[in-house]
Image (cartoon, rainbow, N blue to C red):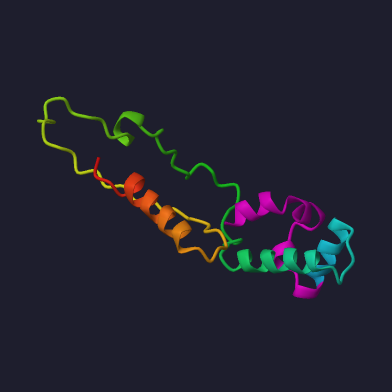
């Protein structure tokens, strides 16, 4: 996390390599210096607050450039990540596929019951049929 913060807040760390050790007031002053915004600007407060929140998760005492101990992960084997159809399995069984959908209907403003009956009759005939 510390390395990610050094990348994400590179401008802060360029101005002060120990930005993580600054007090809240000095951190806010550094953000003002880097951004050029007014100290009372909500963006400055948000940047400083985000920095402080991430700092709680970071370990700045760890050797930041110790990449020799980093283990490289092998690339993802795509053939194992995608489920494929096995032709040897009996596929004659009917698949249990279930779908759900939502339909929103905007009803017109009317006092005529026939209009509503026509709408709902049409919905029943066209959408709720088993065909």
Residue, x 51% and y 41% (percent of image)? 68
Q: Which residues are magenta?
A: 1-25
Q: In the depicted view, which residue is nearer to us: 20 or 129? A: 129
Left or right of 68 in this view: 35: right
Q: Is residue 83 above or below residue 41?
A: above
- Residue 18 shown in magenta: yes
Q: In the depicted view, which residue is nearer to us: 91 or 107? A: 107
Residue, x 55% and y 47% (percent of image)? 66
- Residue 28: image location, x then y, percent: 80, 69
Q: Main secondary structure of the magenta part?
A: helix
- Residue 104: image location, x then y, percent: 47, 55
Left or right of 58 in this view: 46: right
Quadrant in which residue 114 is drawn: bottom left
Residue, x 80% and y 74% (percent of image)? 25
- Residue 24: image location, x then y, percent: 75, 74
Viewport quadrant of the N terminus: bottom right
- Residue 35 shown in magenta: no
Viewport quadrant of the C terminus: top left
Quadrant in which residue 91 is drawn: top left
């Amino acid at each position: 996390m510390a390395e990610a913060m050094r990348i994400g807040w590179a401008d802060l760390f360029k101005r002060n390599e120990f930005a993580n050790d600054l007090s809240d007031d000095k951190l806010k002053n550094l953000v003002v210096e880097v951004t050029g915004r007014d100290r009372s600007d909500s963006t400055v407060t948000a940047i400083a607050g985000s920095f402080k929140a991430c700092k709680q998760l970071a370990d700045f005492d760890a050797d930041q450039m110790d990449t020799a101990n980093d283990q490289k992960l092998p690339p993802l084997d795509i053939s194992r990540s995608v489920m494929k159809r096995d032709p040897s399995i009996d596929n004659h069984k009917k698949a249990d596929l279930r779908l759900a959908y939502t339909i929103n209907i905007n009803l017109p403003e009317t006092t005529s019951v026939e209009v509503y009956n026509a709408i709902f009759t049409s919905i029943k005939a066209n959408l709720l049929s088993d065909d």
